[in-house]
């Protein structure tokens, strides 16, 4: 019985990364844009399918045949930048989740700092995972200690938000930073 790794290796040998996925991605994106733009009218699904099919084939077939000039292969470019884009999308989703946990609302003028803190936390945690902060350990503190401090800080903020009674739990801190005339 084949395991999942063997199945993906077989799919890769069949050209999943070089043919199927780029073709499906380009076809789907072009078709969706044409459907939304309605360039050929409201009842143009057949035309949109044909145009999306042709454009996807025009990108993938030269890759298969090896006729792209060196460094200009669209499929290689797509396959090299998509993991980075996926990482950025995961980071954006994490920022949105953290800002939602901390009660970020677009109508509240004082809640922009929540989005900033969420963004900083996500960048810091991604940096730990990627090994970015190993070189920049100025205080000779281990990354595990920094992570524990960050987690305690986040839990403290969550507890302050949950236990506050209707008002802004960080109003005293805000008043220290932002002085009203």
Image: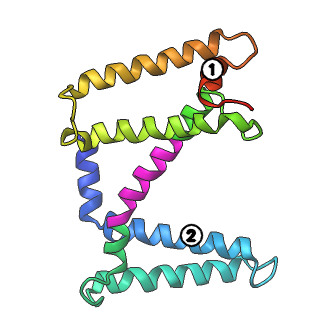
Asked if residue 2 can be seen in this view, the reply is no
Q: Are marks 1 and 2 in contact (CB under 8 Å)?
A: no
Which residue in the structure is indicated by mark 1? 170
Residue at horizontal 69 percent and vertical 79 percent from the top: 46
Q: Which residues are magenta?
A: 80-93
Residue at horizontal 35 percent and vertical 41 percent from the top: 126
Q: What color scheme is it?
A: rainbow
Q: In the rendered view of the protein, which quadrant contains the N terminus?
A: top left
Predominant secondary structure, magenta span: helix
Q: First in sequence, mark 1 or 2: give its number.
A: 2
Dot 2 crowding, Cα within 10 Å, few <14, some 14–19, many 20+: few
Q: Is residue 43 left or right of residue 142?
A: right
Task: Check residue 154 in the rendering and tell me which mark sits there, or answer none.
Answer: none
Task: Name the one closer to the observer, 129 or 135.
Answer: 135
User: Horizontal and vertical percent for residue 69?
Assistant: 27, 90
Task: Name the one closer to the observer, 4 or 146.
Answer: 146
Task: Name the one closer to the observer, 97 or 121.
Answer: 121
Which residue in the structure is indicated by mark 2? 29
Asked if residue 68 can be seen in this view, the reply is yes
Q: CA distance from mark 1 to mark 2?
A: 44 Å
Mark 1 or mark 2: which is in front?
1
User: Horizontal and vertical percent for residue 84?
Assistant: 37, 57
Q: Is the residue 156 above or below the residue 93 in the image?
A: above
In the image, farthest residue toward the front = 181
Q: In the rendered view of the protein, which quadrant contains the C terminus?
A: top right
Residue at horizontal 71 percent and vertical 76 percent from the top: 45
User: Horizontal and vertical percent for residue 20?
Assistant: 39, 67
Look at the numbered disc 1 and give the secondary structure of its residue.
loop
Q: Is residue 118 left or right of residue 74?
A: right
Residue at horizontal 65 percent and vertical 24 percent from the top: 175
Look at the numbered disc 2 and give the secondary structure of its residue.
helix
The quadrant holding residue 104 is top right
């Amino acid at each position: 019985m084949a395991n999942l790794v063997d199945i993906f290796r077989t799919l890769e040998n069949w050209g999943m990364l070089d043919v199927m996925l780029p073709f499906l991605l380009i076809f789907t994106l072009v078709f969706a844009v044409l459907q939304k733009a309605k360039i050929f009218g409201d009842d143009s699904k057949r035309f949109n399918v044909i145009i999306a099919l042709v454009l996807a084939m025009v990108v993938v077939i030269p890759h298969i045949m090896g006729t792209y000039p060196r460094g200009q292969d669209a499929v290689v470019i797509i396959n090299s930048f998509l993991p980075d884009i996926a990482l950025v999308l995961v980071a954006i989703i994490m920022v949105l989740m953290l800002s939602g946990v901390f009660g970020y609302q677009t109508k509240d003028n004082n809640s922009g700092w929540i989005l900033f803190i969420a963004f900083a936390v996500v960048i810091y945690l991604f940096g730990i995972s990627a090994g970015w902060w190993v070189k920049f350990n100025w205080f000779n503190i281990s990354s595990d200690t920094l992570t524990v401090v960050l987690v305690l800080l986040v839990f403290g903020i969550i507890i302050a938000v949950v236990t506050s009674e209707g008002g802004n739990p960080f109003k005293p801190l805000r008043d220290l930073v932002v002085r009203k005339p």
